[in-house]
Image: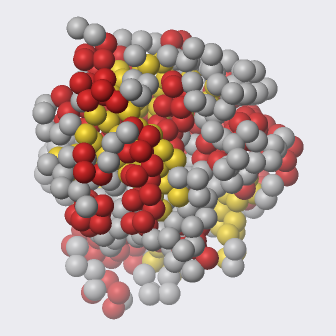
């Protein structure tokens, strides 16, 4: 059997919305524009879609509202919510649904406008009143950046990781973003720039954080026989993994993330090792987020992430592993405060040979995509996807 | 104390009543005896559906900490405290000179009254 048939589902459409600020567009409209972009990329239309996937960034009850807005009638629907990892989960689930005959053309969309909403004084969609840990944690005023700062402080204490090493992750992202005309932060920064930026929550500085941007993205995944007819590069889903990690009933261990579990599952299914990966999209809400995941995925040993990322080792054409060649969430785009789909889109670009020429990995045939959602020092979801060019 | 009467969850109510007495109550499994955090009616370690609250000695060490700086609010120090009983919980460090505070330092529980009259468990450094 050919690789394409074994894969069970093929990514044929990928699209990242060029906007980073959309004050005059609704969230539903941004979802629509992303869907149309990915379908046009694939050579398909909304009328071909029979499987639809979206997550908590979608308005209201998600697919219920957007299916009508998009004018689709999906026979397979999935609202799996894993925060920024949702869209990787969706791709894994879409592959399985297509394999099982539940749908043949699956559409995955993410979109949001947190930047424009903030200008209107609107915050992100609340989690609701019944989060079980809230009575015991919310009174302390913990927020997202503080949660990641607690993780970074622990890693520094346990393994000797430094602020300079974390800063190198931002530096690499900025070296990539300077080639991206749509990047929100296109100007290269230095380690010194990161360390000189205001401390938000020790040990994290403002430049350790990702951007807040409007926008979105979409992916189209289809049955292998449909993919063959479309004359697009064929990108197969070779391995998938999903996991959730929290506080284990009070036995808190901040030294590793759920990526250790989702990554192992994806590598096992794909039958490859970290050393085989030519390009990696690693979810980058903060610099520390990248470092933990690189360790947990096995790109380096636990505790050695700092040395793995320093001195430009994540810069394409310079370092040992090209990571986030679009500039990532740290410099390019973090739509809906989630990203996730942008990680998949850049991996597809690399596998197709459609990345920026200055950053294209030669003969890139195997890529890893890693997503996280929630709070890493709290409760979080992880999804890992390994993609292969057929 | 009105705020306590409005808590509908008996478990949270018992925890808050403990805090009013300046006791930090930690749930323990009725079967395997292991402590867990945060409180819930099933043991997350062995799956047994039954717990009892026991008063903590209130001492432990800092597992991680961060000084959070926000617009329009005074900075404050968030900590994960590893209690000597064997659970780690999120809390706030008070009266600390943040720049000198380190992971591993010994802390003990204290209680601060919130605007609603309820005591919030927080931690302070044990002066050696």
Rendered location of residue B1, percent (x, y): 36, 89
A28 on left or right of A335: left
Residue B95 falls in image quadrant: bottom right
B88 on left or right of A175: left
Rendered location of residue A31, percent (x, y): 41, 59
Specify the color scheme: secondary structure
Rendered location of residue A337, percent (x, y): 52, 57
Residue A8 falls in image quadrant: top left
Task: Check the picture and name the quadrant holding the C terminus of chain A.
Answer: top left
- In percent of the image, x 56 and y 61: which residue is there? A214
Q: Does the image show residue A160?
A: no
Which residue is more in the foreground, B43 or A380?
Answer: A380
- A311 is higher (above) or lower (below) than A327: above
- In percent of the image, x 48 and y 31: which residue is there? A348
Residue A294 falls in image quadrant: top right
Which residue is more in the foreground, B116 or A225?
Answer: A225
Task: Check the picture and name the quadrant holding the N terminus of chain A.
Answer: top left
Q: How many marks are shown on the rendered structure?
A: 0
Rendered location of residue A168, percent (x, y): 75, 35
- A379 is higher (above) or lower (below) than B70: above
A99 on left or right of A26: left
- A168 is higher (above) or lower (below) than A386: below
Q: Tell which residue pokes out farthest to the bottom in this image.
A: B2
Which residue is more in the foreground, A149 or A238?
Answer: A238
Q: Does the image show residue A171?
A: yes
Which residue is more in the foreground, A137 or B33?
Answer: A137
- In percent of the image, x 48 and y 18: which residue is there? A366
- In percent of the image, x 39 and y 26: which residue is there? A231
């Amino acid at each position: 059997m050919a690789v394409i048939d074994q894969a069970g589902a093929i990514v044929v459409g990928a699209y990242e919305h060029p906007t980073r600020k959309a004050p005059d567009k609704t969230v539903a409209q941004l979802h629509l524009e992303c869907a149309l972009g990915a379908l046009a990329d694939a050579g398909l239309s909304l009328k071909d879609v029979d499987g639809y996937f979206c997550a908590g960034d979608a308005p209201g009850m998600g697919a219920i509202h957007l299916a009508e807005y998009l004018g689709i009638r999906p026979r397979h629907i999935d609202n799996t919510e894993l925060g920024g990892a949702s869209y990787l989960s969706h791709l894994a689930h879409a592959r399985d649904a297509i394999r099982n005959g539940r749908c043949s053309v699956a559409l995955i969309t993410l979109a949001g406008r947190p930047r424009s909403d903030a200008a209107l004084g609107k915050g992100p969609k609340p989690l609701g009143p019944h989060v079980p840990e809230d009575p015991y944690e919310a009174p302390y005023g913990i927020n997202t950046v503080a949660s990641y700062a607690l993780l970074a402080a622990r890693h520094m204490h346990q393994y000797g990781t430094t602020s300079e090493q974390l800063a190198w992750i931002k530096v690499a992202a900025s070296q990539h973003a300077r080639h991206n005309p749509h990047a929100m932060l296109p100007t290269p920064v230095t380690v010194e720039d990161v360390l000189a930026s205001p401390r938000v929550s020790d040990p994290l500085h403002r430049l350790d954080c990702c951007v807040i941007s409007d926008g979105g993205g979409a992916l189209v995944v289809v049955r292998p026989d449909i993919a063959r007819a479309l004359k697009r590069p064929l990108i197969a889903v070779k391995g998938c993994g999903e996991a959730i990690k929290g506080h284990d009933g009070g036995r808190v261990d901040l030294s590793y993330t759920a990526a250790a579990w989702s990554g192992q599952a994806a590598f096992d299914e794909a039958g490859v090792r970290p050393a085989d990966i030519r390009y990696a999209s690693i979810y980058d809400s903060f610099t520390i987020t990248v470092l933990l995941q690189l360790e947990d995925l096995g790109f380096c040993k636990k505790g050695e992430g700092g040395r793995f990322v320093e001195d430009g080792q994540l810069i394409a054409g310079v370092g040992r592993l090209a990571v986030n060649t679009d500039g990532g969430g740290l410099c390019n785009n973090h739509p809906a405060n989630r990203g996730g789909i942008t990680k998949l889109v850049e991996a597809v670009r690399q596998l197709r040979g459609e990345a920026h020429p200055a950053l294209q990995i030669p003969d890139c045939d195997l890529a890893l995509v890693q997503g996280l959602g929630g709070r890493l020092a709290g409760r979080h979801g992880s999804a890992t996807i390994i993609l292969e060019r057929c | 104390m009105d705020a306590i009467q409005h808590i509908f969850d008996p478990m949270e109510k018992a925890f808050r009543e403990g805090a009013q007495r300046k006791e930090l109550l930690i749930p323990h499994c009725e079967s395997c005896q292991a402590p867990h955090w945060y409180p819930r009616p099933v043991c997350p370690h062995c799956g047994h559906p039954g717990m009892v609250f026991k008063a903590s000695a209130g001492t432990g060490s800092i597992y991680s900490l961060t000084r959070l700086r926000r617009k329009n609010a005074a900075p404050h120090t968030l900590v994960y405290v590893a209690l000597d009983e064997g659970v780690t919980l999120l809390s706030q460090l008070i009266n600390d000179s943040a720049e000198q505070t380190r992971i591993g330092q010994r802390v003990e529980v204290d209680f601060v009254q919130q605007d609603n009259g309820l005591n919030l468990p927080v931690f302070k450094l044990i002066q050696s």
